[in-house]
Amino acid sequence: MNRILRPSPLLLISLFLAACSAVETERAVAERQAAGMAASQPEIPAHFRAEADASPVELDWLGRFGSHQLEALVSEALVHNRDLQAAAARVERARAMAVKSGARLKPSVAVVGSGGSGGLVEDRQTFEDFSLGAQVSWEMDIWGKLAAGQRGARASAEAAEAQFTYGRHAIAAATARAYFAALEGRLQMQLAQENIQTLEGLARIVRVQYDNGLADAKDLALSRSDLALARAQLEEVTLARRDALRALELLLGRYPGAELELAEALPNLPPPAPAGLPSELLERRPDVIAAERQVAAAFEATAQARAARLPTLSLTANLGNASSELADILRPENLAWQAVGNLVAPILDGGARRADLAAATASQKEAVALYAETALQAFGEVETFLDLGGSLGLRAVQLDEAALEASRALRIAELRHKEGEAPLLDVLTVQQRVAARKSQSIHIQRLKLDQRVQLYLALGGDWRALFE
């Protein structure tokens, strides 16, 4: 006698409870993520090691340079920069994927219709068949797999948005620095031209002295040598300025023709920027926020991979009619319905789902490590640029003193040479030192402006005032 095997209700309940124990809730995933991130972070000090003002970070950093031209150029870069346009497209794509993942949680409805004809070849009879109906299908998210996928996609979209924001910050900072470099190039060109004029005058004097027997051939050769070197330096700084202009034009989305007309002087240096507290940095930096959102997406992917190993239940319902007459398929009395539930439980898949879980877990570890690295990099940048600000200030003071002493030495050397107490070589040597000190002073002025921009970028924060 054949016996029908019926599963024990107790066994079914036990299997159901075992499956439930493997399911992670949204809160459980968030707690696991927080624990993983906390374990990867270094101990955060109460204050930055470098000397800094702990006041809240400023928002409108660009306006503190007092340059309307700079503000206009940054605004242009934010609109026309190709990298930002590509990043904006990535944000749109991520948002669309988040919407798509959420759609899987809802039932889908479709209208299904068909029509055809057939028959027997021998008796030449034909048959027609028409059908029209509606179909509703829904995968019940019992274990939270679809919800985890939706949360993960949403976290990925938020990461893309944060990375886009950081990209805007970076483009604004790069535009400001390229602007400063181009302005420095103009000042270095002017200095080189002034140096050439001075050396040309000196060379004419030496030539007259040589023709009158008051200077030897060595002095004449030295004056010509220094003049040629100054002209070579002018060509060098002129090329550097054109390079800086091209770099700025590329950031603006313009053709790099080195044709921008800019101001004639560097802007004034803003006061030192408040740095806030280290504990607040991770909440301000958009790139750190993006890395944290990537961690959240990775943890949700792990939860999704766990739930994928459990049975899936889907429901399908159909309402419609089929007939050999096209007019009959619309008659209400001929409508028929059907409802079907499908339960699919994975048993053997060659280890595919286990491998998916292992891969998701590895990606989760990678995301946590990248977050920790991004956070450390953020702290490192703030400390570096805070320290750089103090160092540049000290260097500027020493360079000013060096330039003052070099100018004093030049006056003495010129006086002694006129009186015949010192050779022309002394004058030329000191003259080159004076020019070098002036060039270094211009360069350090630009480096101090760069440091302000780099520090603002490193501090992060809400830059909406810049973009509005």
Image (cartoon, grey):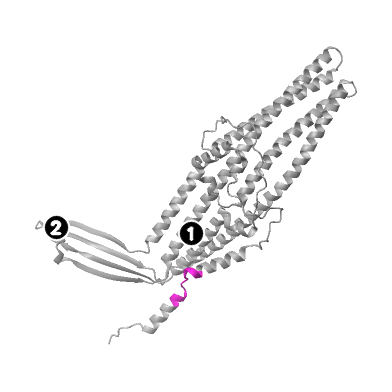
Task: Please check the rendered image and state whether residue 24 is part of the magenta-colored stretch, yes or no.
Answer: yes
Q: Is residue 397 magenta?
A: no
Residue marked by disc 2 = 326
Looking at the image, is mark 1 or mark 2 nearer the viewer? Answer: 1
- Judge whether 10 appears above or below 375 on screen: below
Give the percent coordinates (x, y) of residue 152: 47, 61
Q: Measuring from the top left, give residue 93's x and y in whole percent.
A: 43, 51
Picture coordinates of residue 433, whole percent (x, y) = 79, 31
- Quarter of the figure with the N terminus: bottom left
Q: Which residue is mark 1?
A: 155
Residue 214 relative to residue 367: left or right: right
Name the amino acid, label 1: Ala
Which span is picked out in magenta? Answer: 18-28
Kindly identify the amino acid type of the residue bearing the numbered disc 2: Leu
Please tell me whether mark 1 sits on a helix, a strand or a loop.
Answer: helix
**Looking at this rendering, what residue extends furthest in the bottom direction?**
1
Q: Residue visible at 61% across and 43% down?
A: 64
Q: Residue at x 81, y 29 (%)?
A: 430
Left or right of residue 176: residue 150: left
Residue drawn at (51%, 62%) of the image: 296
Asked where in the image residue 413 lies, by quadrant, the reply is top right
Of the pair 349 and 312, the residue shown nearer to us: 312
Label 1 close to label 2 by CB (< 8 Å): no
> Which of the 4 quarters of the picture holds residue 97?
bottom left
Q: Is residue 72 above or below residue 361?
A: above
Q: Earlier in the sequence, mark 1 or mark 2?
A: 1
From where the camera sits, is residue 269 visible? yes
Question: Main SS of the magenta segment?
Answer: helix
